[in-house]
Amino acid sequence: MSYPPPGFEVKICPPAQLAGRAATLPRPLVFTNGCFDILHRGHVTYLAQAAALGAGLVVALNSDASVRRLGKGDDRPVNRLADRLAVMAALACVTLVTWFDEDTPLQRILECRPDVLVKGGDWPVERIVGAREVAGWGGSVHSIPFLHETSTTALLDKIRKL
């Protein structure tokens, strides 16, 4: 079997199609979001843990403009959205990947109505965007502790020093 499997691009879902496609996914449906600029061990471990909380995983990526507004640096994102979408779609644990241009993923959360909302351990549950809404329709919200202390910013700093 070749990896990534042929046709993995079908997992890339434009925001306008998210509600319809999410409605066909297996439940419980898990949702998470982030930049995922340079994918590393911490990311893939976190995504596998998130996926294990349900039967399907939707990942929403910050658009390039949204990443820049986060103040991560003038040179971020390193990888443009189309490339980040393709890499994310190639992961076996990801069921669907979409994006958002807003400062938060709240609209994507409302569109796909996940049963489980997840963020990394640096996000306390009460600060996770969409937590109130997901809990309001009977879902659960989780902050997954980091197993591998890695960060894209630290990785880029290391590269720049080489």
Image (cartoon, rainbow, N blue to C red):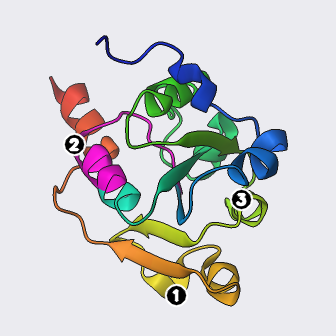
Q: Amino acid under label 1?
A: Glu
> What residue sits 70% from the left and 81% below the top?
133
Image marks 1 and 3: residues in contact by CB distance under 8 Å: no
Q: Amino acid under label 2?
A: Arg
* Percent position of residue 115, x then y: 58, 72
Q: Secondary structure at mark 2?
A: helix
Tell me the residue that label 2 is attached to. Answer: 41
> What residue sits 53% from the left and 70% below the top?
117
Q: Is residue 62 above or below residue 131?
A: above
The quadrant where residue 82 appears = top right
Q: Quadrant of the N terminus?
A: top left
Give the mark nearer the N terminus: 1 vs 3: 3
Bounds of the magenta segment:
33-48
Tell me the residue that label 3 is attached to. Answer: 112
The quadrant where residue 65 appears = top right
Q: CA distance from mark 3 to mark 2?
A: 27 Å
Q: Residues within 10 Å of mark 3 (few under 14, many from 20)?
A: many
> In the picture provided, is 110 more to the left or to the right than 78?
right
Tell me the residue that label 1 is attached to. Answer: 126
